[in-house]
Amino acid sequence: MPCQPGTFNPLEGQDEATDCRECYPGKACTQVALKAPDVDCMQGPNALTNACPPGTLSNRTDLTDPAQCQRCPARYACLRGTGGSQRPPLSCFPGHYCPPGTMFPTQHKCPEGTWSERSGLEAEGECRPCPRGWYCLAGVWGPTGRCSSGHYCPEGTTYGTQFPCPPGTYSTKMGNGQREDCHFCPGGSYCPEGTSKPTPCPPSTFRRLKGGQSLEDCSVCPAGYFCPLRATISPRVCGAGSYSDKGSVECFPCLQGHYCSNETTSEEAMLSVMVCPPGFLCSQGLAREPQRSAILCPRGFYCPGGGIDPNPIPCPNGTFSRQPGLRDLTECAECPVGKYCYSQQPQEQPIIEPTGSCPNGHYCPLGTGYPYTSPCQSGFYRNNSHGHHGDVCVPCPARYYCASPGTSTPTVCPQGFYCSEGSTVPRPCEEGTYSSRPALSDVSECAPCGGGRYCSGVGRTGPSGDCGEGFYCRERASSAAPLATALASATPSSVLTAHLGSNNTSPTGLCSAGFYCTGGSASPAQNEAEEGHYTLEGAMRPEPCPLGTFQPGRGCSSCLECQRGRLCNQKGMSQPGLCPTGHYCPPGYAGAHPCPPGSYADQPGREEVQHCSPCDAGWFCRRAGLSAPQGLCDPAFYCTSGATTATPVLQMSGVPSWEILPKRGKVFSSAQGFSTVGGLRWRSIALSTRHIQPTTKDRANWSSACFVQQCHPSALPKLARNASLTGQTQCPRCHAGYYCPERTSNYTLFPCPHLASTCPDGTRHATQFPCPRGYYNPEPMTRAWTAVCPVPLDTTVRRRD
């Protein structure tokens, strides 16, 4: 608290209001917190005009000049006008000294580093030195205060921080009197000058010795050790199976592909010296040399060594490995002839033995991976049950034909046709011949039409009929009127007259099936149906074979279903074409189905979706219907077999989210620890993930994606078998106007194709719901039959007058 006006206090360390002194006579104390009077009093009307000046006095009453005033005696102070009993000299204050002539009692302070509790001192030498452990400011009647911590105060100290403890020492106490009271800085810390509390070395550093003076005296934690705490005196050992770099606050498990057999393994030594040798598997945290641990590379993998790839790399498709400890790719054994070695997830299911025998209809040379890579060409087949070698297809035998690639069982040559060795399609018996027996091997086995009968068109299974009235037919006759005359007269179309040359023009019968009558016909076989066409009984014109069928013969009453691996995408086809590359063609379908994303077909004539080859590892196949992989995997990603994107998603647990790959298209085996989705372990979305855009009303039941091969088979006839829809418990039903076979991920690929069928909700295959008799489906992709069949297609319609 400050002293109030009218008082002052020249001393430090006072603790009571009574320590404030009244202002001297003749002086004024006009402000608060004064150390001495600040103003001389002005002379009033009663003031002494001839007073002795300050520092002098006089007890006489007869002075005539100021020079006659005596000097104030030592040990006293004489204010103006001092003298006599009413204004005696003032005794010098404690903490001060008063030589002769002193004008006021606080004029001369005891110097800094000294003090005096006595009053009336005469000289500076009478002030006492400040004691050890204390400091004394000027003019004090007692030591000012105790020495500050981190410092020491010898005798005569003037302020509390005059003598700091030297660097490397400290003191937590106050009142130290000598340098020896400062202690050496402990280990794990450093102490700059004047330290009262040691500063700990930060984490990642240590100090074993005492007396550290600055942060630079804290040493960096050495490699192979760790310093996790402040004030570390001795670094901690990492231990075998761990490593660290210098300045580490923790140790890390030894990296996969390396081993840490020392107790103090450094990062540099682990990466450069302790590298897993080829043929061994060094998992994370390995604490012993792999040769001593006998940790061989597992079967089905090869391990090129930690310096190349720390992970075991699966032997690629087309190879296998029964033995552990393989060091490079060349040690993976090629798949033997007649076998295939294939795994869709080689990381989880390595190939340790050939996967199986080559499938029927295909051949497997040395090193075959995907089993359907090499289908037998048209005209050839292969069947394991017949004892065929696995690497060679045999020609289709006589009396049979092999229409499409990948044939496993030859088809018996039908009636009216013959098939020589290596036939791809049946060849029809010529005009004038027929065959009621199947399985002919040569045209010479077709029976000639007997005399009196005729065989019109090719591919006949029997004579067309008897020779027309008024005509005769020799053997191999191809017409009912081989010696036609001009006697024929016009008759209604599609019917014939009863007797040639008569005046009766009324119809006598319907035109035969396989023929059509345009009018004026005297024969039921006026015009023969051409290749790619057919006619029913009573036809006026030939009808083209519908989509999905063909007809190579003439004079036929029906069309043949399109064969496997063949494309019948136009009406009136006489010979089907091969299914184009990038597609597959099941039997009886009008269009080619594109191979789904994640696969491709580089050869024509593929029959089923499983004949599409998975996209090669290191490549991606985003679009459907590819004849070759679309492109290389992007940098920083890797693509396993069947990848649908250049940047596959990788979900992993306990390993880095991404592995940086510097080269496009590199096949990279990731570390273990993948997460699971729906109970299925997966890596780079090797399965197809086709996105489906549902209609508004379906969005409550549809999700945004259907992952192939994850739903329960009982989901049929819904959209996809084995498909896991996010947040759904079942697959949606197939849309009306489409059909969904097994493993469908995009229903739009399968529009309802046939005129004779419809496709309501949930249809499984194109012919599941045939039209009723007498009706047909005029538009593809419709839900229900709506139209009545026209007369040429309705076999129940009778002759009209």
Image (cartoon, helix red, strand yellow):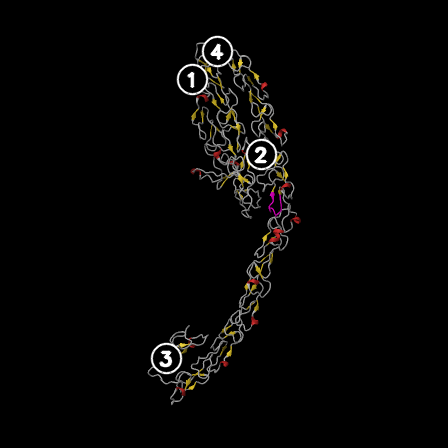
Task: Say which amino acid is labelled 2.
Answer: Thr
Q: Are marks 2 and 1 in contact (CB under 8 Å)?
A: no
Q: Main secondary structure of the magenta part?
A: loop
Q: Quadrant of residue 633?
A: top right
Q: CA distance from mark 2 to mark 4?
A: 62 Å
- The residue at the far left in this view is 45
Task: Say which amino acid is labelled 1.
Answer: Arg
From this view, report whether residue 783 is shown above or below residue 699: above
Q: Which structural element holds mark 2?
A: loop
Q: Position of residue 99 (x, y in %)?
A: 46, 83
Residue placed under numbered mark 1 in the picture: 800
Q: Which structural element holds mark 4?
A: loop
Residue found at x 55% / y 73%:
178
From this view, report whether residue 477 is shown above or below residue 756: above
Q: Are marks 2 and 3 in contact (CB under 8 Å)?
A: no
For this rendering, which residue is in front, 41 or 801? Answer: 41
Considering the image in quadrants, where does the N terminus appear? Answer: bottom left
Q: CA distance from mark 4 to mark 1?
A: 29 Å
- Where are the magenta residues, as a range? 302-313
Q: Position of residue 557 (x, y in %)?
A: 50, 21
- The residue at the far right in this view is 292
Q: Position of residue 422 (x, y in %)?
A: 59, 25
Of marks 1 and 3, which one's residue comes earlier in the chain?
3
Residue 489 visible in this rendered orientation of the protein: yes
Residue 41: mark:
3
Q: CA distance from mark 4 to mark 3?
A: 170 Å
Q: CA distance from mark 2 to mark 1?
A: 58 Å
Q: Residues within 10 Å of mark 1 (few under 14, many from 20)?
A: few
Task: Say which amino acid is labelled 3.
Answer: Cys
Residue 373: mark:
2
